[in-house]
Image: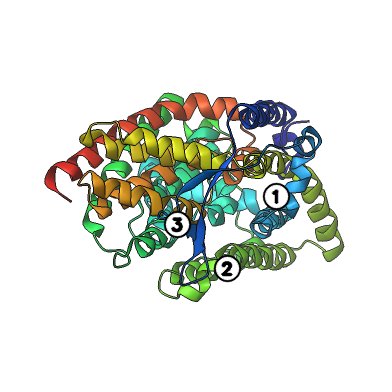
Amino acid sequence: MSKKEKGGINISVKSFITAIVVIFILMVASYLLTIFIPAGEYARVPDADGNMIIDINQGFSLATGGIPFWKWLLSPILVLTSSGNVTLIAVIAFLIVIGGIFTSLDRCGLMKYMLEKTVKRFGAVRYRLMAIVMLFFMALGAMIGSFEECVPLVPIVVALSINLGWDALTGISMSLLAVGCGFASGVCNPFTVGVAQQLAGLPMFSGAWMRMLSFVLIYALLFAFTFIYAKKKEKPISDVGTQNLSSADPKKDKALICFVSILGVGILTVLSSGFITALQDYTMIIVAVMFLIAGIVSTLVSGMKAKDLGKTSLGGVVSILPAVIMILMASSIKYTLEEAHVLDTILHEAVSLAETMPSWSVILFIYLIVLVMNFFIPSGSAKAFMLIPLIVPMAQIFGISTQLCIVAFAFGDGFSNVFYPTNPALLISLGLADTSYGKWFKFSWKFQVLNLILTSALLLFGLTIGY
């Protein structure tokens, strides 16, 4: 039975199998890398905050590595016992909350009612609404570093997109792709630019004009790309099942106000994390809790009984479990390479290769290094502690400013988050939108190529003007 027939959130068998096959191939490839790449490691020392960073004075050395075959087979389970498992468990818990609440919202009719009201209000100016929604999501990523926190909003935007006569891919582009692009532009992103600048000894969020310019140009590219695609797919709103809009329902109106108000408080709290740094480690928890409260309160206000709420929430949790399997398998790739001690070897060889390159191409090579490492390590702050102590001195040798190096790092960290199948937020969002990874790849690779050209040009422009 399809997602539309059952209601709520249900990951289709086709989408699940496609993702599992892709991830399993990557798991096999990672195991083969541990056989053919020698183990090695950089010496690391704690910084002032206790974070382990590479000690470039002691450098790199070969080490004993490898991973037993049985350990590789069990890596999707063993990853829960590795370092960083708290974040992984938080993502899974976050996903379970989303699954339960969205199913309840759908079964009580609140989602359908909300979408009908939105279409009635903005149907005549849907492309203007597209531009506003896209700008909102890009701003969330650029200004406060939101990414995973926006996942609960993705299926809402996807449903809105379909009701406005577009399709699921348009909705994902308006939401997840937009927030990923904003995250990568890194205007005031505390998790990439903020951490990287602190490690490099720069004032936090200094040199913002270049990142603001990047934000504007990337937004223009993303909107143009999505607009052209949506124009090809659009249907008249009267043809997408919204011509017979429901009459006003006082209970649902009240429930909708409760849902938007409570979730709005959560979003405002996350926005305030840009100024209240103590909140930055808890944004995902804040969104999950506020979304849970908003869902429970609004469904009860709409007239659903507590007993029915419990049953539908449980059904939603069960329907989302395939996404948990995908996340564990994707996370096991990093676990395999770290256990075998080959990640540092890959990084060392890349840095050594840069020494043979012409100086103008080094900034693009730094961009490439971060892009490659982002496949294995989706976390921006984790990559910053790993890479910044290496790539900043390398850039300085070739006369490249530290500020430009930070921009290259932000670009390399962010855009591929919405392209690589090793990123949990992408897997969750595609599952929630009932879209296979193959379909998303076919849609988004053209944008990624265009964006790669644009951002490479921006880096070369920065190098030319001495940014």
Q: Is residue 167 visible?
A: no
Within 10 Å of disc 3 (Cα), the crowding (few <14, some 14-19, many 20+) is: some
Image x and y of residue 384, in percent: 44, 54
Describe the element under mark 3 as helix, strand or loop: loop
Q: Which label sits in the foreground, 2 or 3?
A: 3
Residue identifier under label 2: 282
Above or below residue 47? Residue 97 is above
Q: Which label sits in the foreground, 2 or 1?
A: 2
Q: Which badge, 1 or 3, comes first in the chain's sequence?
A: 3
Identify the disc placed on residue 55.
3
Seen at 37% across and 57% down, the residue is 193
Disc 2 + disc 3, Cβ < 8 Å: no
Residue identifier under label 1: 106
Which amino acid does the dot numbered 2 rest on? Tyr
Describe the element under mark 1 as helix, strand or loop: helix
Label count reads 3
Which amino acid does the dot numbered 1 rest on? Asp
Describe the element under mark 2 as helix, strand or loop: helix
Snapshot quadrant of residue 158? top right
Which amino acid does the dot numbered 3 rest on? Asp
Image x and y of residue 37, in percent: 58, 30
Q: Residue furthest left?
A: 465
Residues at marks 2 and 3, CA–CA distance in whole angstroms: 30 Å
Q: Is residue 406 left or right of residue 325?
A: left
Q: Is residue 418 left or right of residue 101?
A: left
Residues at marks 2 and 1, CA–CA distance in whole angstroms: 28 Å
Seen at 51% across and 57% down, the residue is 44
Q: Is residue 311 visible?
A: yes
Frontmost residue, 372 versus 68: 68
Q: Which badge, 2 or 3, comes first in the chain's sequence?
A: 3
Frontmost residue, 201 versus 147: 201
